[in-house]
Image: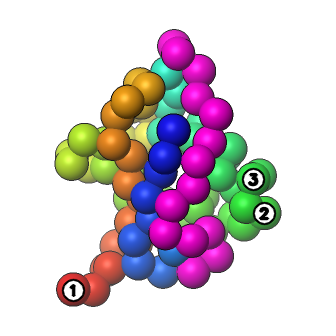
Amino acid sequence: MKISFFGKISDPIGKTLEIAFPESGMSVADIRQVIAQACRTDMILDKTIRAAVNDEVVLENHIVMPGDDVIFMSALSGG
């Protein structure tokens, strides 16, 4: 699955990242852990970094399914 990053979180991770994703889905909190380990940065664990799935801001327990559009963004990404 391709995940996009906007704002300050894209500095240590980059604009996009591909991760393996189970067919049964994965919570936003679990995705954060996978990204933190893969990119060796705890910055993604900062709760000011918001997650959006299919253009809607979601909570940590939201289950992301294969094919969903996932974005992590800093609280102030600029414009």
Alpha-carbon distance for marks 2 and 3? 6 Å
Q: Quadrant of the C terminus?
A: bottom left
Residue 64 x/y as whole percent: 42, 30
| Vertical position of residue 55 compared to residue 12: above or below | above
Circle 2/circle 1 CB separation < 8 Å? no
> Label 1: how many residues lie within 10 Å, few (<14), some (14-19) or many (20+)?
few
Q: How many neighbours does mark 2 have within 10 angstroms: few (below 14), some (14-19), or many (20 or more)?
A: few
78 relative position to 14: left or right? left
Residue at screen point 38% across, 54% down: 71
- For the record, the magenta segment spans 11-24
| Residue at the disc numbered 2 | 40
| Residue 9, image x, y percentages | 52, 73
Query: Residue 38 bears which disc, if any?
Result: 3
Cα gap from disc 2 to disc 1, whole angstroms: 28 Å
For the residue marked with disc 3, what is the amino acid? Ala
Q: Is residue 79 above or below residue 27?
A: below
Is residue 12 highlighted in magenta?
A: yes
Note whether 62 is above or below 70 in the view shown.
above
Q: Which residue is mark 1?
A: 79
The secondary element bearing badge 1 is classed as loop
Q: Amino acid at mark 2?
A: Arg
As helix, strand or loop, the secondary structure at mark 3 comes to helix
Residue 49 visible in the snapshot:
no
29 vs 33, left or right, is left
Residue at position x 25%, y 41% in the image = 54
Give whichever of discs 2 and 1 has the lower sequence position. Answer: 2
**Marks 3 and 1, the one that precedes in the sequence:** 3
In space, the residues marked 3 and 1 are separated at their CA atoms by 28 Å
Q: Are marks 2 and 3 in contact (CB under 8 Å)?
A: yes
Q: Is residue 27 visible?
A: yes
Q: Amino acid at mark 1?
A: Gly
Residue neighbourhood size for the residue with mark 3, other residues' Cα within 10 Å, grouped as few (<14), some (14–19), many (≥20): few
